[in-house]
Image (cartoon, helix red, strand yellow):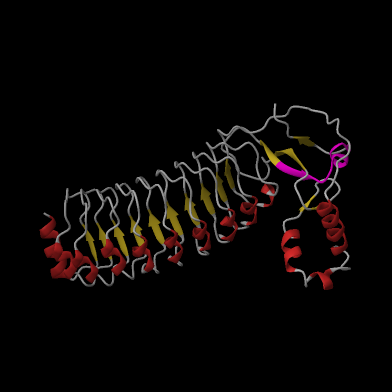
Amino acid sequence: MADTLVLRALRGNAKLLDLSGKKLRRVPKAVGRLRELNRLLLRNNQIAELPAELQALNNLTELNLGNNSLESLPEVLKHLRKLRKLHLFGNKLDKLSPSVFEWLDNLVFLNLCNNKLTTLPEELYRLAELKYLNVNNNQLESIPSKLCVLQRLCELHLANNELKSLPHEIGYLTNLKKLSVARNQIQELPEELCVLRNLKVLDVAGNQLSIFPTKLLELKLEEFYFEQNPLLKKHLISSIQQNEVLTLQEITARYILDELKYNSLKATFKYYPKARKILDHASICAVCKKSFLNTWLECVNFVDVTKEISMTSPACIVPVRVLLCSYKCFNQSGHQYYGIAVL
């Protein structure tokens, strides 16, 4: 049956060949003679390897190998330079050959969900045109920070893995609109996540999160999923500490940061790059609005996000991290910030 379909395609100089669900164990070598082919659909078969003849498909833009028996990434793929969509879901992949991605610089869509991947190669960063990446339902414990240089990436799906954290470099994914990391083991979201001004959908349900980043509400989210996380609850605890002892570095940093607001040190400060790099990590006190260097007192603000974000969970209050510069500010009346204590 498959050979008959290939023969018909050859006669008609076809641009589409659909061999899905044909119980194929191998791809007919004659497919390599279809030089005008744009789309090759091979999903729902038992294919474990690809013939070298496929490298002749210079016009192929879409290849669907979903639900097959591939255990490794076929090297022949690197010759398909015009490929834009690549489906590899539902195979037995436990690793990806880095060399393949060196040549797929036109790829915009990559689906790797439902495999056995434990790592992703750094070479994925070479896919400069990539807009959609799905690695759901694998065994990833981390993702390479170089993945975050994919400036065109709009959707990143990492649900149902074993991730414990996200790289701080995620803030470089400036065009990201949808991020799904549901059902992992993530304990804390990086603050850099909140600079993603184009992010519309954030799914962090089913992780180990207790609190959210300080600038969560600066995101222009339309959908936010956070259920099944061990979020902090309110327990009123008074602080008996009224003062703190600041280090010399902290005292100096606070003085410089305060002076920089009035431009009195800016002209001189440019000659001290190391000092400037240190002060770039300063925070702003949520009470007095003054800058400080080190995280002095971590608090939490329980925020009603119902009016801000479309919710699927009946819960509407989320704990958001707040940083204060001193116990003096913490003990000041009029704010709604709670200290975080280990009970």
Residue 290 appearing in the image: no
**In the displayed structure, does residue 339 sit left or right of residue 13?**
right
Q: Magenta segment range?
A: 321-333
**In the displayed structure, does residue 17 sit left or right of residue 241?**
left
Q: Is residue 328 magenta?
A: yes
**In the displayed structure, does residue 13 sit left or right of residue 290?**
left
- Where in the figure is residue 288, as x and y percent of width and height? 86, 48
Q: Is residue 310 magenta?
A: no
Residue at horizontal 75%, vertical 39%?
Answer: 299
The quadrant the N terminus occupies is: bottom left
- Where in the figure is residue 268, as x and y percent of width and height? 83, 72
Residue 71 appearing in the image: yes
Residue at horizontal 21%, vertical 55%?
Answer: 49
Badge count: 0
**In the displayed structure, does residue 109 sit left or right of residue 31?**
right
Front in this rendered view, residue 216 or 140: 140
Front in this rendered view, residue 14 or 323: 323
Q: Quadrant of residue 29?
A: bottom left
As drawn, 179 above or below 122 = above
Q: Quadrant of residue 324?
A: top right
Front in this rendered view, residue 288 or 167: 167
Residue at horizontal 48%, vertical 48%?
Answer: 142
- Where in the figure is residue 343, as x and y percent of width and height? 70, 26
